[in-house]
């Protein structure tokens, strides 16, 4: 009977295991912290210029309306004054979902922005919502 020497399969070294775990953790961290925010683009992800968003009567004074499909928030800070901003939060790119008491809110991390100028009222966002160009003709609001 021939005897063969049985060698246990070699396990990866501790150094290899630690390096693999570290690389996996780094990949997860970078993916989780990655932001889809590209503040250099404003209307590229929104509806085409000239698209009618809505009517002036749709926008409450001191508040606004989110046009989700167009990626735009239109506000009316004072009677007859209309402003538009990107609906993409500058913190991590979530879509804003609410407008209450003169404040546009992001549901992801609770950043708040002014309906008057898009400026940050409460972080974690540090950059204002980018302004969008609109035109008001009669009672119609359109992207410029």
Image: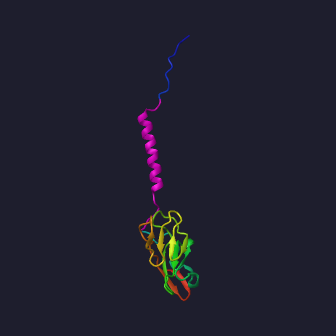
Q: Which residue range is magenta in the image?
A: 11-39
Q: Looking at the picture, tell me which residue is in the foreground, 68 or 52.
A: 68
Taking the image as drawn, is residue 43 in sight?
A: no
x and y percentages locating residue 134 in the rendered image: 49, 80
- Is 96 within the magenta? no
- Residue 105's x, y, as percent? 51, 70
Task: Determine the image quadrant of residue 120.
Answer: bottom left
Q: In the image, what residue occupies the spot 48% across and 64% down?
A: 93
* Residue 119: % across, % down: 43, 73
Q: Main secondary structure of the magenta part?
A: helix
- The answer to which quarter of the image holds residue 52 is bottom right
Residue at point 58%, 81% (across, down): 58
Residue 59 image point, x, y percent:
56, 81
In this rendering, the count of numbered labels is 0
64 or 1: which is nearer to us? 64
Scheme of image coloration: rainbow
Residue at the extreme bottom:
138
In the image, is residue 15 part of the stretch drawn in magenta? yes
Residue farthest to the top?
1
Q: Is residue 92 visible to the viewer in this orientation of the structure?
A: yes
Residue 121 higher or lower than 140, as above or below: above
The image quadrant where one finds the N terminus is top right
């Amino acid at each position: 009977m021939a005897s063969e020497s049985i060698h246990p399969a070699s396990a990866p070294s501790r150094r290899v295991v630690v390096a693999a775990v570290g690389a996996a953790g780094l990949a997860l961290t970078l993916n989780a912290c990655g932001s889809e925010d590209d503040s250099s683009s404003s209307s590229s992800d929104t509806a085409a210029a000239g698209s009618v968003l809505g009517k002036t009567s749709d926008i409450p004074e001191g508040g606004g309306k989110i046009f989700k499909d167009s990626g735009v928030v239109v506000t009316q800070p004072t009677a007859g004054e209309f402003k538009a901003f990107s609906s993409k939060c500058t913190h991590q790119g979530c879509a804003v979902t609410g407008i209450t008491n003169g404040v546009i809110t992001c549901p992801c991390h609770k950043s708040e922005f002014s309906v008057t100028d898009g400026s940050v009222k409460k972080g974690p966002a540090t950059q204002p919502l980018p302004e969008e160009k609109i035109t008001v003709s009669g009672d119609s609001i359109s992207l410029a």
